[in-house]
Each structure stands twice: as structure tokens, then as C-alpha cells.
Image (cartoon, helix red, strand yellow):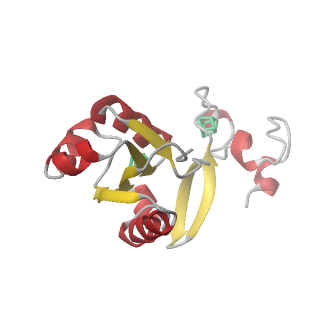
Amino acid sequence: MLESFKRVFVIGCGTCSTVCQTGGEKQLKSMAEQLKSAGKEVTGAIVVESPCDARVLKRDTRKLKSELERAEAIVCLTCGAGVQDIVEHVGKVVIPALDTKFLGAIERIGEFYERCRTCGECILYEMGGICPITRCPKSMLNGPAAACSR
Ligand code: SF4
Ligand code: SF4
């Protein structure tokens, strides 16, 4: 995806991606190093508190305006919502570096359980608060959902 770009800027997420350890300060640094060793110029990098919130995105990126302007593309370590917010408000080509999997519940750091696929037709009220779409491996509504959990 980055083949035709020489100068890149990296954006991480200070909320979910930091908690998931996929797009916080540490991963941002590691991504910048990998990009440099692949021959890219990293014009700047920042962990935005929550890139899916346009107000926060604008506030946090304001201080790195010239570094952002110099970049030809942005490498983004956020979920798909963050990527799209950056596309809309920063006006550059944005390369998603992560794959968004699900809405999860956190048990402890590094331990997450898939709980919602944002299906848009929530039936939790009929299912005793257990989501069969997410927690049944076959997404069956008439299966023993509780037995399928975890
Ligand atoms: S929803 Fe996406 S962009 Fe927003 S805080 Fe979570 S990972 Fe970051
Ligand atoms: S039914 Fe499951 S996947 Fe759909 S919105 Fe509700 S919790 Fe999320």
C-alpha cells in the first residue's frame, strides 16, 4: 500500500489501540522504525487521544501541521472509524495499518473477548444479554449461545 509514497506521517490512537497494544506510543515508535528501515522518511508521528473524535483529532494534530503537510500519506494505527475520520479531516491518503476485528470487553490488559459485531439489529434483550451473533461460532440465534461463550 505504501509503495508509491516516500514521505509518511504515523498516527496512533491513545484509547482503544493503546489498550490493545496495537497503536499506542510503543507501537508507533516501532512502526516508525520499520518504515525508516524500509526506506521511508517519517515526517512525524503522534498518538491522538481518540482519532474517531474530529474535535480531538484536530486539536492533537494542530501542533504538527507542517510535518503532516510534508507527508504524502498517513499510516494509521487505529480502527476503521479512526481511519475514516483522518481521511475526512486531514485530507491525505490514509493507509490503515490495523484490521478492525470487533467490539470487545477487557478482562485484563492484553485479554479481550469479542462481544459485539455492531450488527445494527440488537437482540440482546431477547437473549438474556448474551449475543449469539458474536459468541456462537455459527452466529445461530436458536443455538445454545451460553455454551458457546469464550
Ligand atoms: S474507536 Fe477507533 S479511533 Fe476511536 S478510540 Fe477506539 S480505536 Fe481509536
Ligand atoms: S445483537 Fe450482538 S452484534 Fe448485534 S448489536 Fe447486539 S450485541 Fe452487537
Q: Quadrant of residue 49?
A: bottom left
Q: From the top left corner, tell me how far across and down residue 85 is, in percent.
A: 36, 35
Q: From the top left corner, tell me how far across and down residue 59 is, in percent.
A: 16, 45
Please state if 77 lies on the left or on the right of 136 as rendered: left
When the figure is inspected, residue 102 is found, relative to residue 33, above or below; the finding is above
Q: From the top left corner, tell me how far across and down residue 26 is, in percent.
A: 40, 73
Q: Give the quarter the ligand 2 occupies.
A: top right
When the figure is inspected, residue 102 is found, relative to residue 93, above or below; the finding is below
Whether residue 14 is visible here, answered yes or no, is no
Q: Quadrant of residue 138?
A: top right
The residue sitting at 43% across, 66% down in the picture is 36
Q: Between 137 and 61, which is closer to the camera in this rendering?
A: 61
When the figure is inspected, residue 60 is found, relative to residue 19, above or below; the finding is above
Q: Between 99 and 131, which is closer to the camera in this rendering?
A: 99
Q: From the top left corner, tell me how far across and down residue 41 is, in percent.
A: 37, 58
Whether residue 134 is visible here, answered yes or no, is yes
Query: In the picture, which quadrant includes the C terminus?
Result: bottom right
Query: In the picture, which quadrant includes the N terminus?
Result: top right
The residue sitting at 73% across, 49% down in the picture is 135
The residue sitting at 60% across, 31% down in the picture is 122
The residue sitting at 62% across, 59% down in the picture is 113
